[in-house]
Image (cartoon, rainbow, N blue to C red):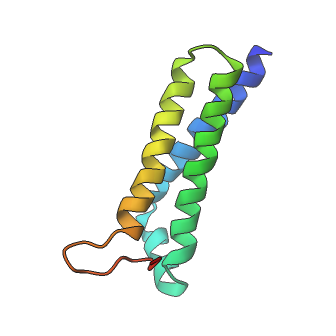
């Protein structure tokens, strides 16, 4: 049973590391996707990774009592979801949001 908890937490950690890599080192690919398609696929992928890693972190917390790795995954997954809202859905200084939703 312990290996199953570690694998769920490891998947969440891997997703967050992939998102970090995608935003930093693979930013050229990210920009190319935005230029060729639109901002929607990139934004939805970032939100999906954030929500899935958040779910894996919560699942890891349910399965194990007070696991530090699961807490880290939950916190970073929540911050990723908040970052999606902050970057893509909120206007800034009179500039309309990148994804109009109201």
Quadrant the C terminus occupies: bottom left
Q: Residue at x 59, y 45 (%)?
A: 15
Rendered location of residue 68, percent (x, y): 51, 19
Above or below, 37 against 4 in this view is: below
Quadrant the N terminus occupies: top right
Q: Quadrant of residue 53?
A: top right
Rendered location of residue 24, percent (x, y): 39, 56
Above or below, 74 against 89 in this view is: above
Rendered location of residue 43, percent (x, y): 51, 67
Does any portion of residue 25 appear in the rendered image? no
Q: Residue at x 76, y 19 (%)?
A: 3
Above or below, 34 against 77 in this view is: below
What residue occupies the far front of the structure in this picture?
Answer: 102
What residue occupies the far right of the structure in this picture?
Answer: 1
Front in this rendered view, residue 91 or 84: 91
Q: Residue at x 62, y 32 (%)?
A: 58
What residue occupies the far left of the structure in this picture?
Answer: 93
Front in this rendered view, residue 4 or 27: 4
Does any portion of residue 14 appear in the rendered image? yes
Count the marks: how many? Answer: 0
Q: Quadrant of residue 9?
A: top right
Q: Residue at x 57, y 66 (%)?
A: 44
Q: Quadrant of residue 86?
A: bottom left
């Amino acid at each position: 049973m312990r290996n199953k908890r570690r694998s769920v937490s490891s998947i969440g950690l891997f997703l967050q590391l992939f998102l970090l890599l995608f935003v930093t080192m693979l930013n050229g690919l990210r920009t190319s996707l935005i230029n060729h398609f639109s901002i929607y696929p990139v934004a939805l992928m970032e939100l999906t990774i954030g929500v899935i890693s958040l779910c894996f972190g919560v699942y890891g917390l349910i399965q194990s009592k007070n696991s530090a790795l699961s807490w880290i995954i939950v916190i970073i997954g929540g911050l990723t979801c908040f970052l999606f809202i902050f970057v893509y859905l909120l206007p800034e200084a009179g500039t309309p949001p990148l994804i109009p939703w109201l």
